[in-house]
Amino acid sequence: MDEHVDTVVIGGSQSGLSVGYHLAQRGCRFVILDAHDRVGDAWRRRWDSLRLFTTARYDGLPGMPFPAPTHAYPTKGEVADYLLAYAQRFDLPVETGVTVHRLARDGRRFVVAAGDRAITADNVVVATGTYHTPRVPAFADGLDPTIRQLHSKAYRNPSQLQAGDVLVVGAGNSGAEIALEVSEHHRTWLSGRDPGQEPTRAGSLPDRLLHPVMWFVASRVLTIDSPIGRRVRDHFLDPPRGIPLGRARRSDIRAAGIDRVPRTTGVRDGRPRLEDGRSLEVSNVIWCTGFEMDLSWIDLPVIGDHGFPRQEYGLVPSQPGLYFMGLPFQRSLSSALLGGVGRDAGFIADHIAARTAGMPAMSA
């Protein structure tokens, strides 16, 4: 089936919905395609106890505050329900259950292939986020088959684990929070570099006082337009690394009896081997080792270092009409956060509206 839409937004989570809101405000014709069965499913499929690292005050999308107390840290279910309500409130044209398997170009128009559909478009916004393919070291295949292995993408709760000790590989926010949860039922080892921690405990009075300052810094100071912002970007993205611990604290990890150990670097006799040469007798391994971006379905020369697209503020200079949303440091440290996507979305929507009207593109 061949069809034409002025603008196709690929991805119906917070980034895609924010772009959709701004496009609708500007009277643009568009459609949002999402592979999940329901808006918000990308959040529903994460581990059960997950909460945001930012308070509800900073979790709203354009035009609709997050419906929770200002200082609350929303759960993944609350985020999923909010995204669904957002799409419904603004009557955004979201088509769910549509998986895009190829994006190419035919002359001046893009071709979006999804199943037996071929949609042509003047503009395409890729808003699929960065959590695509779980990153697991190649040596994981050498672990004894009796060891249960899960990536954090597949982890939901401790009931998935078998009896015995647990090794959590990756000591960032996901690893620390999951290790704290499973340590209530299993002896737990937490392997990896200590990423540091935020200066205040989430929900404390100092945290409430400092949170507005941290948000201002993340969204207005640590930007790609400032030297310090570019240094911070390079620190976190080259190579990719985790941000300091938010809710989990070092003291919590110690109090839970979790054993902090060096990086896991290989396998010996079917058991995970640490950087210091030790092997651990564990029954479960949870890989909290992050994700790789998978943009292999984009049949255009736009992919640069570390699998990230070559873009400027979300615009792709080499492919007029192609945009990306929700990338880490697309504009600032907050660009990939729920409450930070709105500003980038507005800029991209302005650019699309001007391009559609044949006007000169605005600057960032």
Image (tube, helix red, strand yellow):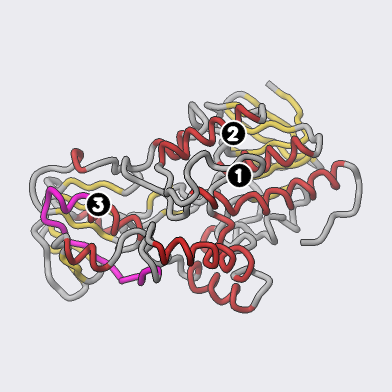
Image coordinates of residue 351 in percent, x first then y, are 79, 50
Mark 3 vs mark 2: give the one in front: 2
Q: Which residue is mark 1?
A: 61
Sort mark 3 into few (<14), some (14-19) or many (20+) by Cα contacts within 10 Å. many
Residue 297, relative to residue 91: is it above or below?
Answer: below
Mark 3, secondary structure of its residue: strand
Q: Quadrant of residue 263?
A: bottom left
Image coordinates of residue 35 in percent, x first then y, are 52, 32
Q: Amino acid at mark 1?
A: Leu
Relative to residue 331, is residue 202 drawn left or right?
Answer: left
Quadrant (top left, top right, bottom left, bottom right) of the C terminus:
bottom right
Q: Which residues are magenta?
A: 181-198
Quadrant (top left, top right, bottom left, bottom right) of the N terminus:
top right
**How many numbered discs, if any?**
3
Q: Quadrant of residue 212?
A: bottom right
Numbered label attached to residue 286 = 3
The one nearer the camera, 83 or 276, is 83
Residue at position x 39%, y 71% in the image? 199
Disc 1 + disc 2, Cβ < 8 Å: yes
**Could you give the CA–CA distance between mark 3 and mark 1, rounded to whole angstroms?**
32 Å
The one nearer the camera, 235 or 27, is 27
**Could you give the CA–CA distance between mark 1 and mark 2, rounded to whole angstroms?**
8 Å
Residue 264, relative to residue 29: is it above or below?
Answer: below
Residue at position x 70%, y 61% in the image? 312
Residue 195, relative to residue 326: is it above or below?
Answer: below
Relative to residue 246, is residue 268 drawn left or right?
Answer: left
**Is residue 195 visible in the rendered structure shown here?**
yes
Image coordinates of residue 111 in percent, x first then y, are 70, 36
Mark 3 or mark 2: name the one nearer the start of the chain: 2
Q: Amino acid at mark 2?
A: Tyr
Q: Which residue is mark 2?
A: 86
Q: Amino acid at mark 3?
A: Ile
